[in-house]
Amino acid sequence: MNERRTSPASRRHSTIARALLTAALMAALAAQSEVAQTKANAPGFPAKDWQLVSPESQGYSSRKLEALRAWLAAGPTTAMMMVVHGRLIFSYGDTARVSKIASVRKSVLSMLYGKYVESGAIDLNKTVEQLGLAEPGRPFLPTEKNATLEQLLAGRSGIYLLPGNDSPERDLIQASQPRRGSELPGMYFHYNDWDFNAAGTAFEKLTGKNIYDALQTDLAEPLHMQDFDRRIQKKIVHPGQAHPEYAMYLSTRDMARLGLLMLRDGNWNGKQLIPVSWVAQSASVTTPFEEMNPPYLRALGSPERWGFGLMWWTWDAEPFPSGVYINPFQGAFEARGAAGQYITVLPAKDMVLVHKLYIDVYPQPAINQEEWDTITNMAISSACNGPCR
């Protein structure tokens, strides 16, 4: 019986061929995996309804998110959603429940402003006097007359009109307001509902549209909001205030669509609903952290550094140079409302977080800013440390 023998050179060539074949297969598999991961991380948009996907498919840990779920269950949270790369990876509570979004309404109004500023229907340089925003029986002081619409959106008008004869002690923000006439327009930031409510009146005067009609046609319909109801959107007139509160009532899952629209620079699945330039302007720092007022908004011991843009809260911290390290909050901005209403947009993580409390009851439940910081960081830290398993 003859045995077929191979020479050392042949064996070497065979080993090399097998190694090359293995390397080629590994490269092909790696490329295939990279394509799949790139596809998974490609920007997405919800269809008629949000579809919950595996957190691991987007690089996040289900086990870590269950810890977040337990944290939320220990508090008064009504609902929360976590959207990564346009896909819903975490949902808690009744996300369809419609309730008041409190001061998140201000950021939504800022979104509505965009296309009318671009078209020229709204001129941000118009003054409060030109816009006829003076209150009956309380004319503007000479220094207040030149405050511009842009300064109203930025909370820097210098107009401090407390509501009627209400005692300022009833509200911490009102209690810390500067004396009327003590600050020039544009020179000082103070979180001021008079500015923001007057901006709502100005919007309707300049566009000829009711805020809620614009909300329906400009945002709710093109975003395919699931729970928006025009009939329940009603302004609230407070005693002693000429400009009403344009209260808004939305669900958590519809708020998530607003956050994703801002994350995508105003573009919704190929349609530009808000000008890119307006998203950049409104969500950029106009007032740095060090100039925020009341003073508790710039407490140096707190873990946050939020400044203010045009009715959006904006993260104010210097990025590391040369892209050496990207802070998860770099470029972040958020809408926030009383008791724990949030739309937080984190471009560095391609993430949107939405949190909701049902506050249409009394007494109101609440979470504070420190608790939201904890929730936000738990969501960010739920990313897989290495390959997801």
Image (cartoon, helix red, strand yellow):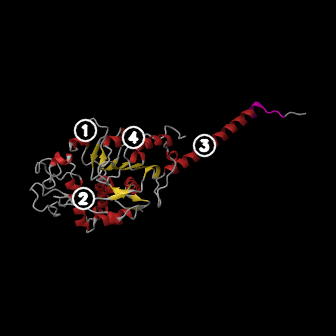
Where residue 136 sits, quadrant-wise, is: bottom left
Q: In the rendered structure, which disc, 4 or 1, sits on the residue that comes first in sequence? A: 1
Q: In the rendered structure, which disc, 4 or 3, sits on the residue that comes first in sequence? A: 3
Q: In the rendered structure, which disc, 3 or 2, sits on the residue that comes first in sequence? A: 3
Q: Report the side of 301 relative to 92 (left or right).
A: left
On the image, the x and y values in percent for residue 291 come to 21, 43
- Alpha carbon distance from label 4 to label 1: 19 Å
- Alpha carbon distance from label 1 to label 3: 52 Å
- Magenta part of the chain: 4-10
* Residue lying at 26% horizontally and 60% vertically, measured from the top left: 246
* Quadrant, the C terminus: top right
Question: Mark 1 packing: few (<14 Cα in 10 Å), some, or many (20+)?
Answer: some
- On whether residue 150 falls in the magenta region, the answer is no
Mark 1 vs mark 2: give the one in front: 2
Residue type, mark 1 in image: Ala
- Name the residue that disc number 1 marks: 299
On the image, the x and y values in percent for residue 158 come to 15, 51
Residue 189 visible, this angle = no
Question: Helix, strand, or loop for circle 4?
Answer: helix
Question: Helix, strand, or loop for circle 1?
Answer: loop
Give the numbered dot on residue 74: none
Residue type, mark 2 in image: Glu
- Name the residue that disc number 3 marks: 27
Residue type, mark 4 in image: Asn
